[in-house]
Amino acid sequence: MNAIDLEVPGMRCGSCVSHVTQALQPLAGVGRVEVDLQSGDVRVSGELAQESEAFLAALTSAGYPAKLAASFSSNAQPEVLKCAGIRNKGGCCG
């Protein structure tokens, strides 16, 4: 099992977490998608067959431009924030 860590800054609420997860889950070999809403970090783990570009492209297509992350906080607890109704920020709020 291997993992890739991503930074996804456009997430604002539980719906964003769902959209990000739905964008990544269908990719070959993905076993688990962990999202830390507060920090914007996403860890994808499993028997990943593709390069990081596939994950970045899937997120961009879903409206969540991302980049490779330097690290992922394994102590982070999932947090669901209420959508502030921010417009033109991407994701579900834009």
Image (cartoon, rainbow, N blue to C red):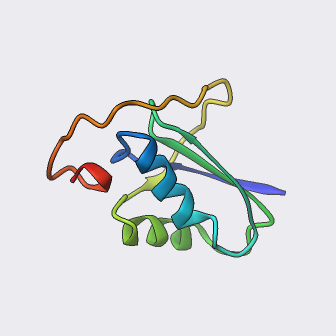
In the picture shown, does residue 11 fall above or below 23? above
Query: Quadrant of the rendered structure where residue 76 is?
Result: top right
The residue located at (48%, 47%) in the rendering is: 17
The residue located at (78%, 56%) in the rendering is: 2
Front residue of 31 and 57: 31
Q: Quadrant of the N terminus?
A: bottom right
Q: Quadrant of the C terminus?
A: bottom left
> Outermost residue, left direction?
87
The residue located at (63%, 65%) in the rendering is: 25
Front residue of 80 and 65: 80
x and y, in percent, of residue 42 in the image: 55, 46
x and y, in percent, of residue 75 in the image: 66, 24
The reply, left or right, for residue 89 in relation to residue 78 is left
x and y, in percent, of residue 35 in the image: 56, 42
In the picture shown, does residue 70 fall above or below 73? below
In the picture shown, does residue 33 fall above or below 54? above
